[in-house]
Amino acid sequence: MIQVAKTAGFCFGVNRAVETVYKLLHEGKRVCTLGPIIHNPQLVESLRRQGVRIISAPEEAEVGETVVIRSHGVPPEITERLERRNIPYVDATCPFVMKIHRLVSEGSAAGRRIMLAGDAGHPEVEGILGCCKGPYSTFLTADALEKMFQNDPELAKTPLLFCQQTTFNVEEWEKCLFFIKKVCTNASVFDTICNATANRQQEAKTLSAESDLMIVVGGRHSSNTAKLRDVCAASCETYLIETADELKALPIAGRRKIGITAGASTPASIIKEVLVTMTEINETNELNFEEMLEESLKSLNTDEKVHGVVVGISPTEVYVDVGRKQAGFVPAAELSSDPNAKPEDLVKIGDEMDLLIMKTNDQEGTIMLSKKRIDAIKGWEDIAAAMDAAEILTGKVAEIVKGGVIVVYNGIRVFIPASQAVANRGDDLEALKDTEVQFRIIEVNRQRRRAVGSIRSVLREQKKEAQAKFWETVEEGQEFTGTVKSLTNFGAFVDLGGVDGMIHISELSWNRIKHPSEVVSVGDTVQVYVKGLDRENGKISLGYKKIEDNPWEILKNQYPVGTVCDATIVGMTTFGAFAKILPGIDGLIHISQIADRRIEKPQDVLKVGETVKVKITDIDFDKKRVSLSIRALLEEQGEAKE
């Protein structure tokens, strides 16, 4: 049986660099690369035949050429030389390598000595070391690292920054890490081995442990391919080959199980050729070749890509010219991951697109192609890179499912658990449906085709930034439009835009209220002003009552002394009755002012709830007291009759 590693073939960074060269060629540009674009002589030779030159320094670029910086990256001084000479260039440095450049540059600028696990002669390492602004050291093994500390005991106390070449041996790094934790007292350690490298090595280790023979396909000058060979050789008989022609000299026939893996710079066409040749040699192969090839092409598709131009559209498929004698077509189901999308809404005549060959029918002269699958492949690479870079992505919430929501990003369905979908527990998930959201990737499982994200982490970060900005500018008296977030017995909490403030119940109304819900409800938009700030504890007191609504101001303006008005009896005492003039203002009708005769108690004349005519005889605004009289009106009426 022959088994192919799922991760074999081009990694994200290499694929990106090669695609950059092909794109420039397609645009009609003359291209040269700073060093071989990848460590694979067959692909490099193919590009040479298409006019791509290899140069070793910016000064070798000819007028009219565009320089491509390969995925390994270069020292900053190289790009500076390109810019000084106004040489057009495209930087195809792998994002994972760029991350190391940044770490090394910032770390060395902060006074840390750089300790890089990697091959000092490798172009990636040369580019990384070119970012150092101070002393640095490189090492290839844990033993070499230990000897370095033995020769310089002071190194253990020195501020250090450890990182690794992206293709460094994972097991060897584990040994180094054990030593670092044991010895170093002032070290920052970053794991910069590329995820693709780690996964590839782990899969190769597992596959080789189950196999009688391992074939590692890739360039002999490729660092990551050599490391794969070393990983496999520890478990079984292993051979590194560059092309299928080398298989003839190997002891393949009759083996029970053969494993195949390939370096990150190995084109899919070479891996396919190896598979075909091995199937012919090993006639006892139990695995259906077409099924195996279909499975392997999920990741090994680079040379199965074609560039097409839309020449026709029907309700069921799109017709494309791919520059071959066969007629190309894309079934509607292979055009988009959206099952409801219509071809005419997605493309138009003349559109160009990258496609994946699904099936060739020479008898009918057709090629069945897929855009959906190539988008998914790129989408998964983007997803993995975004997770490593903690990048914030934007996608649309397509579904509300059990336990969370589904967000679609570049054709990839990302599951957001309910606990990571909203800022606060209890928030309505349904409100997210069909909305654009920002999120981060927190887990990727390529084998299960599963990606997990978090909206909450982005919301929290945005809230933290908003809070910091708010506290920088907020002042007492400042007015805000906010949203009522929650209610308690003692007040209402208002969201001012990432920061909460509280309106005390006494500030909600000029009238006496028993609960804030008598004035506001959750979700209400309210105008408030900052009444008090406690910066140390992060608390904000808000004012809500408006001066113009103050009943005492209304009384002053509309009810001067001498005014006759209706009042409602609200309470009785031995010395008189209290009557409500305005909401929030009660006046006293002294027992002597209730009637034009002497009475024993107010209840002899009045009852609670009764509305009576009164005259305002006195107002004390300082003590908030109002004196009322019924007797004065009765006497005035008596005088009028006389």
Image (tube, helix red, strand yellow):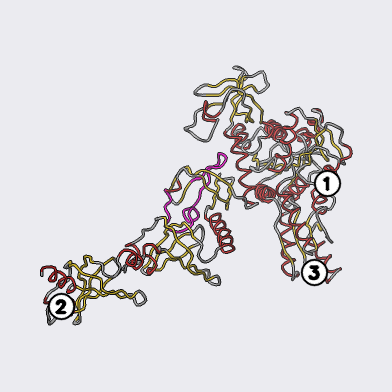
Q: Residue furthest right?
A: 59
**How many C-alpha atoms fall within 10 Å of the one at disc 3: few (<14), some, or many (≥20)?**
some
Q: Residue at x 44, y 57 (%)?
A: 483
Secondary element under disc 1, as helix, strand or loop, is helix
Amino acid at dot 1: Glu
173 is within the stretch colored magenta: no
Dot in front, 1 or 3: 1
Could you say where residue 508 lies in the image, as x and y percent from the top left? 38, 65
Indicate the amino acid at tag 3: Thr
The spot of residue 104 in percent (x, y) is 77, 57
Residue 421 within the segment the image draws in magenta = yes
Q: Is residue 531 left or right of residue 362?
A: left
Question: Disc 3 marks which residue?
Answer: 158
Q: Quick one: 450 or 241, which is closer to the camera?
A: 450
Compare residues 316 and 171 and report the one nearer the observer. Answer: 316
Q: Position of residue 28 (x, y in %)?
A: 76, 27
Query: From mark 2 to mark 1, how far is it between C-alphas?
Result: 97 Å
Dot 1 or dot 3: first in sequence order is 1
Q: Which residue is mark 2?
A: 602
Looking at the image, residue 196 sits to the left or right of residue 461; the answer is: right
Q: Which residue is mark 1?
A: 80
- Residues rendered magenta in the picture: 406-430
Q: Quadrant of the C terminus?
A: bottom left
